[in-house]
């Protein structure tokens, strides 16, 4: 990675460990150090957005808990207290540098609805363009587990795509991706640059929720799949390293840089929403001719190409598209509802002649064969 002095739009993900003491409480000292680095970027003319954890850590003591709570209601109550304390601390510190901070609380459903997704994008763009520092977090006080983003690593990658960021920086308790766990292997090698998320890379990260990976690395690898597919250069480094954020923007920090070599497979905003946020409402299976028409000739389907339909959905819905062998081709927005598409699939060859001009338009198709999309993220 070579140094780049252009003005950037940077998304920085801050985990709880980057803001808390050894006892699990919010650390004013760590917060001050973080804000100092962000202010330095702002002084250089960069736009900065934070995706920050820490609300539960900031609030659980005020709730009367001696240790970080385990139950969901207590976590949500602690977040309700801590969110205000956290944003107040951020706001006071940024004001001391002459900058204004703002708070954006979102849920996964805000991203799954295209209108709300675009509204969030417009709001954040106004804030960034006016020099304000948006501080984004999931609305933990009302979000239930099945509707959560999963973690703030994933959220930060989706936010980076939402705002067309020039760089995503994820800070962790480890200084990059290693070929094995450096806590167990003193000879572990730091990977300075990753241009493709391969099976070997995923094996290094371990399974989700396992103790095999290198410091909770799997969620970060999933996040980098999203950012790389969106064409956003990304960085993973150790929180607390002096000047880590500033140096990462200058491409001189110790850590791992993630960036696709082939920039022609990047997803546009519509495709990002389809791939990572929409939540497919149904599934259509197409025959070999239809598959060839989509992948080889980059054309929409003919009615005759519809083999079967699963689920109920309206025109304009996002659906999964697969071939008759069950291999997923990708995701797309269709211009017919499920009932109409089912009728096409049930027609005989003779009956289909009446619909030879009927075209099943698939808007902004995202093909999993062409773009490294993390399915299910």
Image (tube, helix red, strand yellow):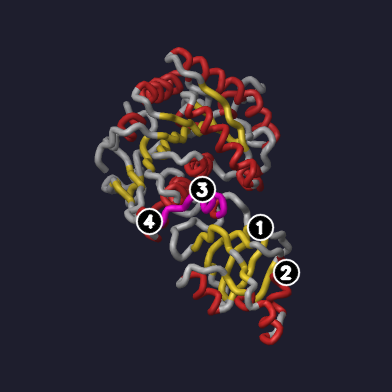
| Residue 274 horizontal side relative to residue 219, left or right | right
Q: Quadrant of residue 200?
A: bottom left
Q: x, y percentage for residue 220?
A: 45, 45
Marks 1 and 4, how far apart in space? 26 Å
Q: Which residue is mark 1?
A: 317
Instruction: Please give the label number shown on residue 269.
Output: 3
Magenta segment includes 270? yes
Magenta segment includes 20? no
Neighbour tally class for label 3: few under 14, some 14-19, many 20 plus, Cα within 10 Å: some
Query: Residue shown at 49%/51% (left/top)?
Result: 210
Q: x, y percentage for residue 270?
A: 54, 51
Marks 1 and 2, how far apart in space? 13 Å
Q: Quadrant of residue 240?
A: top left
Q: x, y percentage for residue 176?
A: 35, 42
Which span is picked out in magenta?
265-274
Neighbour tally class for label 1: few under 14, some 14-19, many 20 plus, Cα within 10 Å: many
Query: Residue shown at 37%/41% (left/top)?
Result: 235
Q: Which of the two labelled residues, at mark 1 and mark 2, occupies the earlier sequence position?
A: 1
Q: x, y percentage for residue 146?
A: 66, 48
Given residues 293 and 190, the one toward you in this image is: 293
Q: Which of the two labelled residues, at mark 3 and mark 4, occupies the earlier sequence position?
A: 4
Q: Which residue is mark 2?
A: 340
Q: Which of the two labelled residues, at mark 3 and mark 2, occupies the earlier sequence position?
A: 3
Tell me, yes or no, whether the two marked residues, 3 and 4, touch with CB atoms within 8 Å.
Answer: no
In this rendering, the answer to whether 288 lies above or below 266 is below
Q: Which residue is mark 4?
A: 264
Asked which secondary structure carries label 4, the reply is helix
| Residue 191 horizontal side relative to residue 75, left or right | left
Q: Which of the two labelled residues, at mark 3 and mark 1, occupies the earlier sequence position?
A: 3
Q: Main secondary structure of the magenta part?
A: helix
Asked which secondary structure carries label 1, the reply is loop
In this rendering, the answer to whether 162 lies above or below 89 is below
């Amino acid at each position: 990675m070579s140094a780049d002095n252009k003005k950037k739009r940077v998304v920085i993900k801050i985990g709880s460990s980057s803001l808390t003491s050894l006892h699990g409480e919010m650390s004013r000292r760590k917060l001050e150090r973080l804000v100092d680095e962000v202010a330095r970027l702002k002084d250089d003319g960069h736009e900065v957005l934070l995706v920050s954890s820490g609300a539960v850590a900031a609030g659980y003591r005020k709730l009367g808990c001696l240790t970080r709570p385990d139950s969901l209601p207590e976590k949500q109550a602690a977040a309700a207290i801590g969110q205000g304390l956290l944003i107040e601390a951020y706001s006071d510190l940024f004001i001391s540098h002459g900058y204004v901070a703002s708070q954006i609380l979102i849920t996964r459903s805000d991203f799954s609805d295209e209108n709300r997704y675009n509204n969030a994008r417009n709001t954040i763009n106004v804030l960034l363009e006016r020099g304000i520092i948006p501080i984004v977090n999931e609305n933990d006080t009302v979000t239930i587990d099945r509707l959560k983003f999963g973690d703030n690593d994933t959220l930060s990658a989706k936010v980076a795509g939402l705002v067309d960021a020039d760089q995503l920086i994820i800070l962790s308790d480890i200084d990059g991706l290693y070929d094995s766990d450096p806590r167990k292997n003193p000879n572990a090698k730091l990977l300075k640059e990753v241009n493709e998320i391969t099976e070997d890379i995923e094996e290094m990260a371990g399974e989700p929720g396992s103790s095999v990976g290198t410091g909770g690395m799997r969620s970060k690898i999933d996040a980098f799949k999203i950012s790389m597919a969106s064409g956003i250069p990304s960085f993973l480094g150790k929180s607390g390293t002096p000047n880590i954020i500033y140096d990462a923007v200058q491409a001189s920090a110790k850590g791992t840089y993630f960036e696709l070599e082939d920039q022609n497979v990047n997803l546009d905003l519509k495709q990002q929403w389809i791939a990572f946020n929409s939540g497919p409402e149904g599934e259509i299976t197409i025959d070999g001719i239809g598959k060839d028409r989509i992948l080889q000739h980059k054309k929409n389907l003919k009615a005759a190409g519809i083999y079967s339909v699963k689920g109920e959905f309206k025109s304009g819905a996002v659906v999964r598209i697969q071939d008759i062998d069950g291999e997923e081709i990708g995701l797309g927005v269709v211009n017919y509802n499920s009932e109409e598409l089912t009728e096409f699939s049930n027609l005989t060859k003779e009956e289909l002649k009446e619909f030879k001009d009927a075209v099943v338009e698939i808007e902004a198709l995202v093909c999993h064969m062409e773009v490294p999309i993390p399915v299910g993220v």
